[in-house]
Image (cartoon, rainbow, N blue to C red):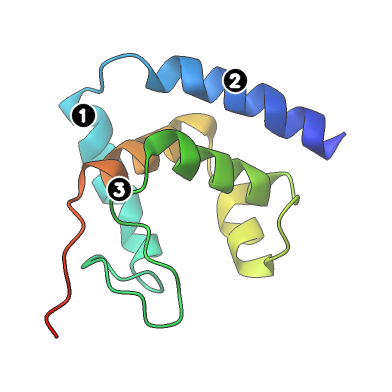
């Protein structure tokens, strides 16, 4: 059942993400991201917790949905995504997709 829910959610999300994103969606995503940056760095660096900056929106949404339906095992991410609506996750996906990946200085 979990895999089927994920597949349906991905299809719906892909259809919605295919439409042009509004500035309000990204602004809402930025607002919601305040919880994300407590663990994920917003500068694109990966120091043990994966960077989510610059991810393709459809991939970002798929990963969030897989945590929400508990297909991916991570209690923290499951709890966070459990509180998010599809609209919230789409806004986060659009916001993080809009951020440029930064190249680390060596």
CA gap, disc 1 to disc 3?
14 Å
The residue at which mark 2 appears reads as 11
Q: Is the Cβ of the residue at disc 1 closer than 8 Å to that at disc 2?
A: no
Q: Nearer the viewer, mark 1 or mark 3?
A: 3
Q: Which mark is residue 24?
A: 1
Q: Note whether 91 is above or below 66 in the view shown.
A: above
Q: Which one is in front, 26 or 99?
A: 99
Q: Nearer the viewer, mark 1 or mark 2?
A: 2
* Mark nearer the N terminus (1 vs 2): 2
The residue at which mark 3 appears reads as 96
Q: Which mark is residue 90?
A: none
Which residue is pictured at 24% across the width and 36% down the height? 26
Tell me if 12 is positioned left or right of 27 in this view. Answer: right
Quarter of the C terminus within the rendering? bottom left
* Mark nearer the N terminus (1 vs 3): 1
**Percent of width and height locating residue 53:** 30, 56
Quarter of the N terminus within the rendering? top right
Local secondary structure at mark 3: helix
CA gap, disc 1 to disc 2?
23 Å
**Percent of width and height locating residue 61:** 50, 39
* Mark nearer the N terminus (2 vs 3): 2
**Percent of width and height locating residue 66:** 66, 46
Tell me if 30 is positioned left or right of 18 in this view. Answer: left
Q: Note whether 40 is above or below 47 in the view shown.
A: above
Q: Note whether 99 is above or below 14 in the view shown.
A: below
CA gap, disc 2 to disc 3?
20 Å
Within the image, what quadrant is residue 35 found in? bottom left
């Amino acid at each position: 059942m979990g895999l089927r829910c994920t597949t349906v959610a991905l299809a719906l999300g892909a259809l919605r993400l295919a439409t042009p994103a509004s500035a309000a969606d990204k602004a809402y995503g930025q607002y919601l991201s305040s919880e994300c940056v407590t663990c994920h760095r917003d500068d694109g660096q990966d120091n043990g917790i994966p960077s989510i900056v610059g991810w393709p929106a459809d991939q970002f949404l798929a990963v969030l949905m897989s945590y929400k339906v508990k297909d991916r095992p991570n209690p923290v991410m499951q709890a966070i995504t459990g509180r998010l609506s599809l609209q919230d996750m789409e806004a986060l996906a659009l916001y993080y997709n809009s951020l440029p990946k930064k190249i680390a200085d060596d």
